[in-house]
């Protein structure tokens, strides 16, 4: 597999990565330090030890010798230079040069772009090299067991990372440690990708050594976005047209999901203790949760809008459900959440907890994903620690999860406590909730709840919309929500849905562009016309049939906003109720609710 | 809530099939499961008694929780995968210490799952048989297999073939059972015999699964009765505390 020496200049790059992934971070910085001076001086000096390095495995961890690093550096540098010739000119975001590095903080500079291009080509070419060391050779307990347990698991993890189909995935996500150790890859096994990830880490350290931070790399077909959080490095290689900001937002979700399982504090502690720790040991079994998250991120606009979507429900029913949750409490219970069809029905919060900080949509997304990605939840009652990273990245809550309507398992109760030992007490709350719901026949009422059709709005040219009201001062602790009708024809097929979402993502990226933010976009696309509008009160994305006129669209939006105003009690959780489970006897679940109602005119929609 | 009378805990490395075993027993089905998070609580009606079963996550991530789930347990099912030598080793290295919080008279069962992958005997579905499969037959079947199969610790498992090499024999399990008993400080007279407490099962076909659970449930009955008596004396006793206060007599 080490083939002929002259052809695989690229493969050398891969070797380098192999090394940096094996070396401890000290070696990484070493690598960087050597790179800079070397860059100018040397060219293609060393091809000597190539074959040796090829055979190194991730597991054969050894401490790097500086000499070896030097050699690696020159290899990388040689590679960078050859690439430079190939790609220079196609770059457009030029700023600082690493040599005079440190001056300008953030932007991608020329050489980085080249090295990024290098990553992109590397991602592909490294594969040839890896064939030998990949999945086949080494059977980790992880992949091995996965194969037996679940075929779907197998198909992702065991994907051939040398195949074209692997390269053609729309969006790759990689997570690695600062020492270059692979932690997660969306497609293909991490082991097979260890050299690729090593290259990524080499890039990160290379730029870092110039007191700079690599943010992104653009090539014609791909956007590579880097995010460094503590000891973790997250990389997205996307061929979608999403903006860097959006992709970084998605990487952040991945990071948060990891935090939700391990907490930030424990991850820092682990890596402080042992720089080259293999985090997969702790995440083993969680790949499916990350896979599920990434699928949701691609298919559910909640993530794009950073808002939660609740199931439309008559406000009387929602209130009665909230009251049921409010009554079933036990000490240290902090959140009671009712979910149907993977959407929020209602959420009740502990009063004092929520006064300090609010529940962020992202935390709710992570919880929903955890439930969705774990079909094992469908029988029995789960008791598991979970961290809500935006609430507090360093602590665990204990989550009680149980379905209320087995065997259908569409209505799910989620109770969060701060007390590790509270399982039986919390399970008792579920009994109470179950009884109360049976008494009120809530389950059959919930079963009737569903998404609404855009036709209910009564605007003929309107095909779809997403409406997100902003918090207003009165109500700033309200969970950010959005509402959206079902995606109907012509957006009923998966491809068309994705196409519409892509259009929305494009509109969103224009609205939220850092360099040139927009308030209003009227976008005539090939098969539809879109209008996006952001004000201080709301953010709105609408999709019309292609023949709509601008005047028509504006009239339609006026109508739509009126309709939402009329329906808002049904479309949103208006007043998230609270309870008090602290010993402090300000027994005021009721009074807190009426207080809330006093401040009623929360200006959800004082539109137009 | 029906108060559980007794607690049974499933322990073992990830992917050995703990959830599948329980699912097979409770739902009479085998289906793909996903990795358990934390622990899952099930209540099983056994005659007049309510038996709570905790299916725990095998992942290292949740390791810290194990001792909590085990607190006050009357029986612990230590599960391994017969095709993975490592999964047996993990029981000793990682899981045995978690059982420290269990009752003093806790019963231990050692269960090698996925035996359908290695033994032709276990490949027939036994769903309807209930208890009919007795262990002596199973053990005898195993005896034959053992002569053919060489346990090859840590050798790579062929993933393509339908019949995998058995890495852990029943003898290995029995040896481990002996070590567990020594760890627990139980002498030969008070402990349950290894041949009775080491099982080989297949959650996929149902082989030996009912036998496992039902044997255990029968064995914890004395524990239930004793606890009921204690509860009469102090009717409001905390479920969690009962385990810790338990008398030290060893059962059976």
Image: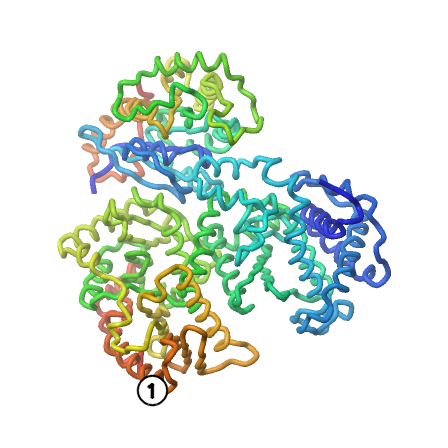
Q: Residue at x 27, y 81 (%)?
A: A562
- Foreground residue among A174 and A238: A238
At 24% across and 30% down in the image, what residue appears?
B227
> Residue B21: x percent and y percent?
35, 31
Question: x and y percent of residue A410 in the render?
Answer: 27, 52
- Marked residue chain, label 1: A
- From the top left corner, tell me how far across and down residue A332 is, in percent: 33, 55
Quarter of the image where one finds residue A463: bottom left
Q: Which quadrant, please, contains the C terminus of chain B?
A: top left
Give the residue displayed 40% in from the left and 16% down from the top.
Answer: B194
Asked if residue A46 can be seen in this view, the reply is yes
Helix, strand or loop status at disc 1:
loop
Q: What's the coloring here?
A: rainbow
Q: Say if A604 sits above or below A38 in the image.
A: below
Identify which residue, B198 or B4, lies in the foreground: B198
Disc 1: which residue: A608
């Amino acid at each position: 597999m080490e083939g002929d020496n002259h052809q695989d200049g690229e493969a050398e790059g891969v070797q380098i990565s192999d090394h940096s992934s094996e070396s401890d971070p000290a070696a990484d910085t070493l690598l960087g330090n050597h790179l800079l001076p070397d860059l100018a001086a040397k060219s293609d000096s060393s091809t000597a030890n190539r074959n040796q390095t090829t055979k190194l495995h991730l597991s054969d961890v050894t401490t790097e010798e500086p000499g070896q690093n030097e050699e690696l550096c020159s290899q990388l540098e040689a590679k960078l230079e050859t690439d430079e010739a190939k790609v220079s000119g196609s770059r457009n975001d030029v700023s600082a040069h690493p040599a005079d590095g440190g001056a300008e903080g953030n932007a991608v500079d020329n050489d980085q772009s080249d090295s990024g291009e290098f990553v992109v080509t590397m991602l592909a070419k490294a594969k040839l090299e890896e064939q030998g060391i990949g999945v086949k050779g080494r059977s980790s307990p992880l992949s091995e067991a996965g194969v037996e347990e679940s075929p779907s698991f197998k198909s992702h993890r065991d994907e051939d990372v040398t195949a074209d189909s692997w390269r053609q995935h729309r969006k790759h996500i990689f997570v690695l440690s600062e020492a270059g150790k692979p932690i997660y890859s969306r497609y293909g096994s991490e082991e097979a990708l260890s050299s690729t990830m090593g290259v990524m880490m080499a890039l990160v350290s290379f730029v870092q050594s110039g007191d700079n931070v690599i943010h992104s790399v653009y090539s014609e077909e791909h956007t590579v976005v880097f995010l460094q959080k503590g000891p973790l490095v997250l990389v997205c290689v996307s061929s979608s047209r999403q903006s860097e900001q959006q992709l970084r937002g998605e990487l952040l979700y991945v990071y948060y999901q990891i935090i939700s399982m391990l907490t930030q504090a424990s991850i820092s502690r682990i890596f402080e203790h042992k720089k080259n720790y293999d985090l997969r040991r702790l995440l083993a079994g969680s790949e499916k949760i990350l896979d599920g998250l990434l699928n949701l991120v691609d298919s559910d606009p909640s993530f794009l809008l950073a808002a939660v979507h609740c199931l439309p429900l008559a406000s009387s029913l929602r209130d009665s459900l909230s009251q049921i949750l409010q009554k079933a409490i036990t000490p240290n219970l902090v959140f009671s959440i009712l979910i149907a069809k993977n959407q929020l029905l209602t959420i009740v919060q502990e009063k004092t907890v929520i006064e300090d900080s609010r529940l962020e949509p992202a935390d709710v997304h992570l919880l929903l994903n955890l439930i969705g990605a774990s079909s094992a939840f469908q029988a029995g009652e789960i008791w598991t620690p979970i961290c809500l990273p935006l609430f507090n990245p360093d602590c665990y809550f204990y989550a009680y999860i149980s379905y209320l309507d087995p065997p259908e398992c569409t209505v799910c109760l989620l109770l969060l406590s701060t007390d590790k030992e509270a399982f039986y007490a919390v399970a008792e709350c579920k009994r109470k909730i179950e009884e109360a719901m049976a008494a009120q026949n809530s389950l059959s009422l919930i079963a009737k709840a569903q998404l609404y059709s855009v036709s209910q709005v009564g605007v003929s040219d309107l095909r779809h919309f997403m409406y997100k009201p902003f918090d207003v001062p009165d109500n700033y602790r309200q969970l950010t929500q959005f509402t959206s009708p079902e995606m109907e024809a012509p957006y009923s097929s998966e491809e068309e849905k994705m196409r519409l979402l892509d259009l929305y993502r494009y509109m969103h990226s224009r609205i939220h562009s850092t360099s040139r933010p927009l308030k209003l976009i009227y976008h005539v696309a090939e098969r539809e016309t879109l209008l996006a509008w952001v004000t201080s009160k709301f953010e709105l994305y609408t999709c019309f049939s292609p023949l709509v006129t601008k005047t028509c669209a504006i009239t339609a939006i006026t109508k739509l906003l009126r309709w939402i105003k009329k329906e808002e009690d049904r479309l949103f959780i208006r007043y998230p109720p609270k309870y008090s489970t602290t010993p402090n006897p300000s027994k005021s679940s009721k009074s807190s609710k009426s207080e809330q109602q006093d401040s009623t005119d929360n200006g959800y929609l004082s539109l137009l | 809530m029906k108060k559980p009378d007794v607690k049974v805990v499933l322990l073992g490395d990830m992917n050995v099939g703990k959830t599948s075993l329980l699912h097979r027993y409770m739902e009479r089905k085998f289906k793909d499961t996903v990795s358990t998070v934390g622990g899952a609580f099930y209540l099983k009606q056994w005659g007049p008694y309510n038996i709570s079963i905790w299916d725990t996550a095998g992942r290292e991530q949740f390791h810290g929780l194990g001792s909590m789930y085990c607190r006050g347990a009357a029986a612990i099912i230590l599960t391994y995968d017969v095709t993975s030598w490592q999964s047996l080793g993990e029981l000793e290295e990682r899981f045995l210490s978690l059982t420290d919080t269990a009752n003093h008279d806790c019963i231990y069962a050692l269960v090698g799952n996925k035996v359908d992958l290695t033994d032709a005997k276990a490949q027939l579905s036994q769903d309807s048989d209930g208890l009919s499969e007795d262990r002596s037959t199973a053990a005898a079947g195993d005896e034959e297999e053992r002569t053919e199969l060489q346990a090859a610790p840590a050798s790579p498992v062929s993933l393509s073939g339908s019949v995998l090499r058995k890495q852990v024999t029943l003898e290995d399990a029995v040896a481990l059972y002996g070590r567990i008993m020594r760890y627990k400080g139980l002498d030969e007279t008070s402990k349950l015999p290894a041949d009775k407490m080491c099982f080989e099962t297949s959650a996929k076909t149902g082989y030996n699964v009912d036998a496992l659970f039902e044997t255990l449930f029968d064995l914890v009955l004395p524990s239930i009765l004793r606890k009921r008596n204690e509860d009469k004396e102090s009717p409001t006793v905390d479920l969690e505390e009962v385990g810790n206060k338990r008398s030290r007599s060893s059962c059976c």
